[in-house]
Image (cartoon, rainbow, N blue to C red):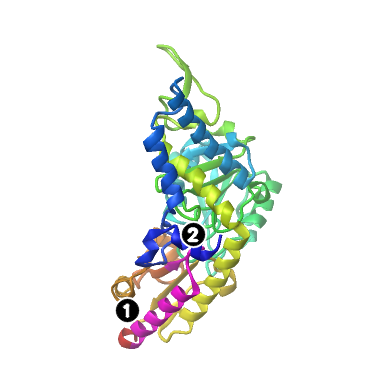
């Protein structure tokens, strides 16, 4: 599929220039149609009925699990559905077999969702070792390795920093984690769907992925990949219907994996839509998506960097999909509002749920940054319009 075909499938793009993929991506018509098909023709609960409509709903739901597993190269049983990446990370933080005195290694450039849950463990006697990135927002694998000792229970890191766009050396860290036999979690919220991910190549034990970002899927969807060899060390946090196979007045017996982790009625339509989104990405081709995004990211970085009064963050050769910047003398939210009012350009402004990262790059006192983020549906013309409008803002309002 070519760029024009994708844009034709996303009505939202008719009226705006959407550069906020790091927050969420617009959903293509075929994905919405798949969800509507569920609501119109087999709107029943899953795993709870022998009648044909319920059986079909269950079958379509589980097909999505299988599609995801094939897409990231794992077993279907290693996929646990959640409503977002945050829930998936919290499932590990609160369900893994941590004990008082254990430690977790986490960089300082993480989204709050991959930072706050670990800080929260300190109240249970877990030590959190925070590793600082360099001035470009990149973590040195050696700095991770130096922090590993006999107490280390988990290493966690984002693949692409949401506030900066810096790509982290997750594969090198995976080699270290495997050698040291330390469990390893990757937050792939900003990389999955934007580039090919083979979970086996990462060496990760856990990977958290949302459906509503790079996958072009519905909001309220996501999943945790948990390696088969380690999933037994994870306790379910949401017990009840669907998680057990037997209950007495004194005790209960948990279902097998992944059922024991998916308590209650799931977002059935959303998961079915997520499966269709996987099909959609397959039709485009991940190699094509990555080439297109790398080219546009480079263009966006260089054009914004050339603007007088601009301050840009990160290293151009190591930024992917996200460009964070400021215009000296102009509040970040004002920049975002003017872009919207003048050219209907949608970007994010502020701290991006990553205050430690924003402080690290020196943008906290500036009110954070303006963040432009893209996907395959974006064009070089849209990037040019962004740069032209920023040039005007800089000329009229900048220092």
Determine whether 168 is above or below 53 in the image: below
Q: Position of residue 2 (x, y in %)?
A: 55, 63
Circle 1 packing at 10 Å, graded few (<14), some (14-19), many (20+), is: some
Q: Nearer the viewer, residue 79 or 41?
A: 41
Residue at image position (48%, 29%) is 56
Task: Name the residue tied to disc 1.
Answer: 330
Secondary structure found at label 2? loop
Observer able to see residue 119: no
Q: Nearer the viewer, residue 172 or 67?
A: 67
Residue at image position (40%, 84%) is 309
Identify the image quadrant of the N terminus: bottom right
Q: Nearer the viewer, residue 388 or 242?
A: 388
Q: Nearer the viewer, mark 1 or mark 2?
A: 1
Q: Which mark is residue 369?
A: none
Q: Position of residue 236 (x, y in %)?
A: 48, 31
What is the magenta range? 372-395
Identify the main secondary structure in magenta. helix
Whichever of labels 1 and 2 marks the residue nearer the N terminus, that label is 2
| Residue 128 placement, left or right of 177 | left
């Amino acid at each position: 599929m070519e760029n024009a075909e994708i844009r034709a499938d996303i009505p939202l793009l008719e009226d705006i220039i959407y550069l906020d993929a790091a927050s969420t991506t617009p959903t293509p018509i075929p994905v919405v149609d798949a969800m509507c098909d569920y609501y119109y023709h087999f709107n029943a609960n899953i795993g709870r009925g022998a009648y044909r409509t319920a059986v079909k709903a269950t079958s379509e739901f589980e097909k999505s699990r299988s599609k995801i597993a094939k897409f990231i190269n794992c077993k279907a049983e290693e996929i646990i559905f959640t409503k977002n990446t945050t829930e998936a990370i919290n499932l590990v933080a609160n369900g893994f077999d941590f004990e008082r005195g254990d430690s977790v290694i986490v960089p300082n450039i993480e989204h709050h969702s991959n930072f706050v849950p670990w800080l929260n463990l300190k109240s249970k006697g877990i030590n959190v070792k925070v590793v600082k990135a360099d001035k470009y927002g990149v973590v040195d694998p050696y700095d991770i390795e130096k922090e590993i000792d006999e107490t280390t229970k988990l290493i966690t890191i984002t693949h692409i920093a949401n506030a900066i766009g810096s790509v982290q050396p997750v594969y090198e860290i995976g080699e270290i984690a495997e050698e040291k036999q330390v469990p390893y979690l990757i937050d792939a919220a900003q990389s999955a769907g934007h580039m090919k991910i083979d979970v086996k190549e990462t060496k990760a034990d856990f990977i958290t992925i949302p459906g509503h970002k790079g996958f072009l899927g519905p909001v309220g969807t996501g999943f945790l990949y948990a390696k088969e060899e380690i999933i037994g060390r994870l306790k379910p946090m949401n017990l009840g219907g669907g998680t057990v196979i037997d209950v007495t007045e004194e005790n209960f017996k948990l279902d097998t994996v992944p059922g024991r982790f998916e308590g209650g009625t799931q977002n059935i339509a959303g998961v079915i839509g997520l499966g269709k989104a996987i099909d959609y990405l397959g039709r485009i081709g991940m190699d094509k998506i990555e080439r297109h995004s790398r080219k546009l990211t480079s263009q966006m970085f260089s054009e914004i960097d050339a603007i007088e009064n601009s301050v840009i963050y990160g290293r151009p050769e190591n930024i992917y999909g996200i460009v964070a910047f400021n215009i000296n003398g102009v509040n970040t939210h004002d920049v975002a509002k003017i872009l919207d009012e003048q050219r209907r350009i949608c970007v994010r402004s502020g701290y991006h749920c990553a205050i430690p990262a924003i402080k690290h790059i020196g943008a906290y006192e500036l009110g954070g940054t303006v963040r432009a983020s893209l996907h395959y549906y974006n064009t070089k013309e849209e990037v040019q319009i962004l740069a032209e409008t920023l040039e005007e803002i800089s000329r009229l309002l900048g220092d």
